[in-house]
Amino acid sequence: MKKVALVFGLLLGSAMAAQAGNPIVPGWYADPEIRIFDGQYWIFPTLSAEDTPPAVSPTFSEKQLKLRANPKIWSPFLKQTYMDAFSSDDLVHWQKHDHVLDVKDVSWAAFALWAPSAIEKDGKYYLFFGANDVHAGELGGIGVAVADHPQGPFHDALGHPLVGEIHNGAQPIDQMIFRDDDGQYYMYYGGWKHCNVVKLAPDLKSVVPFPDGETYKEITPDPDYVEGSFMIKRKGVYYLMWSEGEWTGPDYSVAYATATSPFGPFTSQGKILQQDETIARGAGHHSVVNIPGTDDWYIVYHRRPLDTNDGNHREMAIDRMTFGARGLIEPVKMTRE
Ligand code: FUB
């Protein structure tokens, strides 16, 4: 992919071109969410395997140690206790910000710190994250942390999860915060093949019912939906995107549906990102960015190198995403560029 130095290039009216390769940074990272804050690109990913830090941090409280003793934490994939972030002026050169969120600042969380979604509101930065395992009958789900800067440090804002139960069969993970043009914030979320949308209160710390009284609206757009929902709006059309297939498998992929409202009904439009036997497998859990002032779009996602079967081995990539004449998303071409 030719990555053009975007915001500043556009501001200068120049075509500051640069090239870099996929994966965009070294290391095992997954579930990348891209955002623009103060003219800079930010990516908030899951650390895909806890490699360097100790399994038990000296800062853990007794409650966290107890949670972590859960025998279900069998895999490095579940052991994440912190998140890093990356910033860039041009989508090419990325600066790493270590430990923007750490479970030491979330009293109820001890593992599986997953799939963040970041948003700025009134000068504060909110990082929504998944943690622990509700399915195992313990406190867990989607939390919200706040900071004064995108690089954190983020601190838990509630002392408990924002969504800590299973509604409509949806695993409380993989949330994405979407601000509609009228200023309303929505949270899309859900694993285990179910997708919900909730309306967030103006402080972004609680959910409020829709006018019909429903709070957790199930909007599962397709029987193949698995997880990783992401919403964009272009030319008045809502595009709900998601991951399907097995997360450890080669067929992990991205599909989407369209609607004229943020909560559907959605029309399924098919897959747009799939494995390419010459590049990588398991391409999924993505996010999308629109370059301000243009109709240029990029998809940021994780994928698995061809020479590995390790489910934890996921790397971040960026490729171009284009729309056809009828407003449908064209299949994404995965690249190494
Ligand atoms: O990285 C943890 C989990 O793997 C995410 O929550 C899923 O979307 C899958 O990518």
Image (cartoon, rainbow, N blue to C red):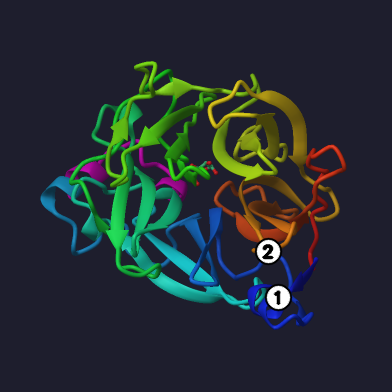
Q: Which quadrant, please, contains the N terminus?
A: bottom right
Mark nearer the N terminus (1 vs 2): 1
Residue 93: within the magenta? Answer: no
Residue 35 versus residue 117 in the image, above or below: below
Q: Position of residue 234 (x, y in %)?
A: 68, 45
Residue at 35%, 55% (x, y): give it.
126
Q: Give yes or no for contact between labels 1 and 2 (Cβ–Cβ under 8 Å).
A: yes
User: Which label is found at residue 293?
Assistant: 2
Tell whether 177 sits left or right of 62: right
Secondary structure at badge 2 equals loop
Q: Position of residue 122 (x, y in %)?
A: 34, 60
Residue at 61%, 24% (x, y): give it.
221
The answer for how far apart the CA atoms under marks 1 and 2 are is 8 Å
Q: Nearer the viewer, residue 107 or 77?
A: 107
Specify few, some or many for label 2: CA neighbours under 10 Å numbering under 14, 14-19, or 20 or more: few
Q: Quadrant of residue 170?
A: top left
- Over which residues does the magenta segment extend? 65-79
Q: Which residue is mark 1?
A: 10
Secondary structure at badge 1 equals helix
Residue at 18%, 63% (x, y): give it.
59
Residue at 59%, 54% (x, y): give it.
313
Q: Position of residue 28 (x, y in %)?
A: 55, 61
Amino acid bearing label 1:
Leu
User: Which label is found at residue 298?
Assistant: none
Amino acid bearing label 2:
Gly
Q: Nearer the viewer, residue 319 or 60?
A: 319
Specify few, some or many for label 1: CA neighbours under 10 Å numbering under 14, 14-19, or 20 or more: some
Name, please, the residue furthest toward the front.
182
